[in-house]
Amino acid sequence: MGIWTRRDSSQRRPSSTIAIDRKVIRFRRLVEQHGEVLDLFADLQEKQSGDYILDSQYIEAGLDRVYEGVRRILYDMRVISDSDSGEGYDQLDRLRSVSEKILREAHQGGDRQEGSSGEEELDWETLALQMLLKDLTRVPAYGPHAVTGTETGVAAPESLTEWAGWAHLKAAQWITDNLPRVSPAPSMNVFDDGTRAFCVQVYLLGGVREAEVAIRQCLALEPAVHPGATSLLPLRYFLEGLRSPSDGTEARQLCLEDRGKKGAGEPEAQLQIYTGEDFLLLRLPSSLPVRLFWCSLSVEQSENLIYLYGMPRPPLFEQLTSGPFSSEQEPFPAHRCGISGRWMYWASRFSWAQGEERVRMLGHSLAESTTVRGSGTTGEDVSRCLRAGITNFLEQIVVGDPIA
């Protein structure tokens, strides 16, 4: 009888758990799609230099791909945020008609035309691509007469790249604000056994929901012996970093409590981890510059992803330029973007070791910042230390300082 009861309960998953799984996975797909769109723009930017022989079919195909990509980003944002608004779709159609007009008029202008510098003649295809990119990525005229969006209340996006960023930010903000509200109760809570300065609430998603033995081994940092333990390695790396600060101070003991029980005293820092197969999504307190941290690790580099979203925009972002970049420290595709005080950073196609290093670093940064250094430590002290730890993490990850 008990066996049959157990089988029925595992087969009937509550609708809320299915919904949260879908929203988290769709958010990852939106991030990946935005990266693909920015990569397309980078490719078109390179091709409009005049050093390539272009044809109209290449330009038209590129336009199709970027417009379809942004349309998918808008759609995913609507699904994530349960929005019925059609804002964005009509604007995309209008922008598409402008792009087609630019391409048509450039074609009618002749085979070779004077470039923008007036010093050389360019094929009409190259000139058309230059004008298209300028239009698709133009900066809006913010000011007292700027047109405002019906939902944003601020200057509405005016270019294709702005609409992609706007939709991405809307989705990230919804995840930040509403994920706990639509989630079931956390499966487990992890505390710092010595000081209870923080609590990590663990929510189980997707294929790891039934791997309770592996999850307990992971949370207790015991040797991984369960068949499902491999998919929980991102969670294990984070907890190992959280338990052992990199500054050499004594490792803290983690205390496991079940099903949302609360011990004596309310922890100062509440962290929420959503963990699924090969990934974790961490929600951080609103007092910190980082609000979301996503990490997916796989032996297939194409499936690896590190993503950060935060607000307000930290001062270090003033040093950065939006768009794809790479460096000696990050020899893989990465993107930085800051809009209206909010910012995003994401990277992909790195090695497992590079991802593991960054997950551990985040745990180390939080561990160092929440290490209580005296009995008189207050909640304000913990918040200030948390912010310092996260800022240090940002400087090493986003700016690209060496992290060996």
Image (cartoon, rainbow, N blue to C red):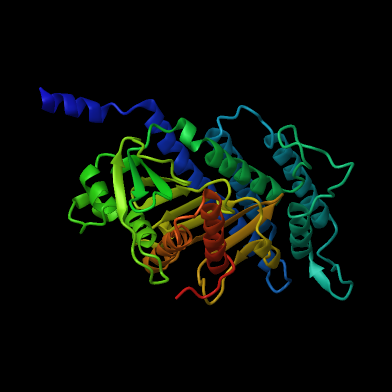
Q: Find residue 40 and report its horizontal and vertical position in percent.
A: 61, 58
Name the residue at the top extreme.
Answer: 1
| Residue at image point 29% right, 51% down | 219
Left or right: where 155 falls relative to 56? right
Q: Quadrant of the N terminus?
A: top left
Along the viewing direction, whichever of 208 and 37 lies nearer the viewer: 208
Q: In the displayed structure, would residue 370 be above or below residue 272?
A: below
Left or right: where 191 falls relative to 168? left
Left or right: where 179 falls relative to 143? left
Q: Find residue 396 and report its horizontal and vertical position in percent.
A: 54, 69
Along the viewing direction, whichever of 102 and 24 lies nearer the viewer: 24
| Residue at image point 28% right, 26% down | 12
Name the residue at the front extreme.
Answer: 376
Q: In the displayed structure, would residue 129 be above or below residue 156?
A: below
Q: Quadrant of residue 241?
A: bottom left
Q: Quadrant of the C terminus?
A: bottom left
Q: Does the image show residue 72?
A: no
Q: Find residue 115 and report its horizontal and vertical position in percent.
A: 84, 69
| Residue at image point 78% right, 58% down | 134
Along the viewing direction, whichever of 364 and 370 lies nearer the viewer: 370
The mark total stands at: 0
Q: Quadrant of residue 243?
A: bottom left
Q: Find residue 388 and report its horizontal and vertical position in percent.
A: 56, 61
Q: In the displayed structure, would residue 395 be above or below residue 382?
A: below
